[in-house]
Image (cartoon, helix red, strand yellow):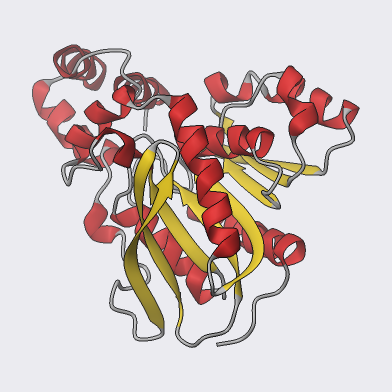
Amino acid sequence: MDQRIIDLYDRFTHGEMNRRSFLDKLTQLAGSTAAAAAVLPLLQNDYARAAIVPSDDPRLVSERVVFESPKGKISGYLTRLKGNARRPAVLVIHENRGLNPHLEDVARRLALDGFLAYAIDLLSLVGGTPPNEDDARNLHPKLNQDDAVVALVAAVEFLKKYPLSTGKVGAVGFCFGGLMVNRLAAASPELDAGVAYYGRQVPATQVPNIRAALLLHYAENDGGVNAGIADYEAALKANNKSYVIHTYPGTQHAFNNDTGAARYNKAAADLAWQRTIAFFKEKLGAPPPA
């Protein structure tokens, strides 16, 4: 797909233009109203494709769990393999559309690999994630990011103390969630490992506070995010932090999201996921078998 169309959609989804302006510009780039109508579904997430791991998978126990934070009650989706074994915990942090079926499915994938996975709904801070994607995206700008970091720090503490947790906690996030992983790593001394997918970086002044090991996945074609990589890596290196950076050739922002046809790159997503699971097993401890 034309990179200009993808960049246009990114501007729209990040609140830089309204829907009318986006559709007008999309029509211009696509060449006609009919062509724009054909392209639009490819840009939007199709959550009907989200369930790589069915929500009723008999191997798993999944439930809605609410915890208390200094900013109020926060809701999320907790999932794990059946049984009472204690497992390393992984906090799953969503994109700018709140906690949706795709992120719940990501949590179930982690659960099948033996982790106690908690997909958090940070839009709990502004009323909770609406079922409609457009409504969720429109609500997201009302979220105060500093409040979200406070909630995430509390989530790490909640997972460390959870009865079926080993006390080791990691976090994985995508897009906005990737930024939040970086911010959480700088804010929480209790976080053991963080994996950020195409997430913007924290300022160099915050890097000395990071204690977690980091795995940073980036798309090759993602100018806005990638502009901060060099300074971030220099600060991580200067402060002797544990980190690994991977950039995936030929990919675009959101290459991991299999519900978005325009940018999903299966080969890169599969490789990044393999690296993510191996990283968590190394840094949090190998989960017990089913």
Q: Position of residue 287 (x, y in %)?
A: 65, 76
| Location of residue 164 with respect to 200 vertically, above or below | below
Q: Position of residue 177 (x, y in %)?
A: 48, 39
Pick the quarter of the image with the N terminus: top left
- Side (left or right) of 199 relative to 58: right
Tell me if residue 238 comes above or below residue 218 in the rendering: above
Towards the viewer: 51 or 206? 206
Position above or below: 237 against 63: above
Q: Is residue 8 left or right of residue 83?
A: left
Splitting the image into 4 quarters, where does residue 242 fall? top right
Q: Is residue 174 visible?
A: no
Residue drawn at 45 percent across, 34 percent down = 148
Whether residue 163 is visible: yes
Count of residue discs: 0
User: How far from the left and from the top, in percent, is residue 220?
Assistant: 60, 33
Q: Quadrant of the C terminus?
A: bottom right
Residue situated in front as seen by the camera: 198 or 248: 198
Nearer to me, 175 or 117: 117
The quadrant where residue 144 appears: top left
Expressed as whole percent of the image width and height from the top left, the position of residue 13 reads 31, 26
Residue at the spot 37% in from the left edge and 27% down from the top edge: 6
| Residue 226 in which image quadrant | top right
Furthest residue in direction left, as rendered: 34
84 is higher (above) or lower (below) than 95: below
